[in-house]
Image (spheres, rainbow, N blue to C red):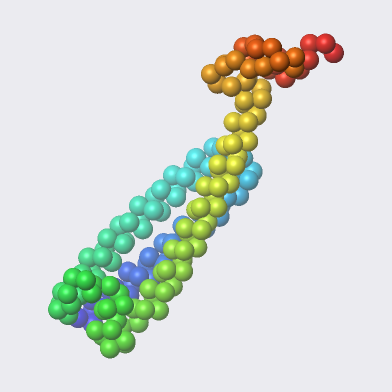
Amino acid sequence: MSRQVEQLQEILQRLIVEFEGLQELLRQERTLIKERKTDAITAIAGRIDAALEQVRTVDTQRQGLTHQLARAMKLPPERRRLKDLDAALGGQGGLLALRDRLREVIGTADRLNRENQAAFKGVLGAMEALLHAVNGPADRSISYNRLGGREANRGLSRMFSRRL
C-alpha cells in the first residue's frame, strides 16, 4: 500500500506542476489580450486547451488511485477523499500538504482565467461598440435624427453632419 501512497503523491505533484504550467499560459494569454494579438490569442487558446486536457487525464488517474486506496483501506464511499486517506494513514501520508498546495494553484488558475475572460469581454465589447458606431446597429433598425424625426440607420454617414 505504501507504493500506492507514493504513486498518489507523485500524481498530486504532477497535477500541481500541470496547473502551474496552465497559470503561465493564462498569464501569456492576458498579455496577448492586452496587446490585441488575435492570431497569437488563438494559438495560445489551443495550448491552454491541451493543458486542460492533460490536467483532466492526470486528475482521472488521481481519482482512480484515490478510490483504489480507499477501498484497500476499507473506507466507505463517502470517505474517499484525500483528507480521509491521510487520516487513515495516521496523518503520515503527506497528502494534506499536497492537497492544500493543489487547491492553491487551482484557485490561482481559476482567478487568472476569470480575469482573462473579463478582459476579453471588455475588448469584445469595445470592438462591438466601435463597429456599431461605424456601421450602425446590425439590424439596421429605425432611429431618430437630431430633429426627432425617424430614419433608417445608414451606418457611417449617420455619424457626421452633412451640413459641415
Residue at (52% x, 56% y) in the render = 112
Q: Quadrant of the N terminus?
A: bottom left
With respect to residue 116, does 86 lie above or below?
A: below
8 vs 160, left or right, is left
Residue at (41% x, 69% y) in the render = 102
Residue at (55% x, 52% y) in the render = 115
Q: Nearer the viewer, residue 117 or 45?
A: 117
Q: Residue furthest front?
A: 148
Q: Residue furthest right?
A: 164
Q: Nearer the viewer, residue 52 or 88?
A: 88
Question: Would you say residue 29 is visible in this rendering?
Answer: no
Residue at (22% x, 65% y) in the render = 64
Q: Quadrant of the C terminus?
A: top right
Q: Position of residue 86 (x, y in %)?
A: 29, 81
With respect to residue 41, does 8 lie above or below?
A: below
Q: Position of residue 19 (x, y in %)?
A: 43, 62
Quadrant position of residue 141:
top right
Quadrant position of residue 163:
top right
Q: Nearer the viewer, residue 69 or 156?
A: 156
5 vs 145, left or right, is left
Question: Would you say residue 43 is visible in this rendering?
Answer: yes
Q: Position of residue 107 (x, y in %)?
A: 46, 63
47 vs 58, left or right, is right
With respect to residue 43, does 163 lie above or below?
A: above
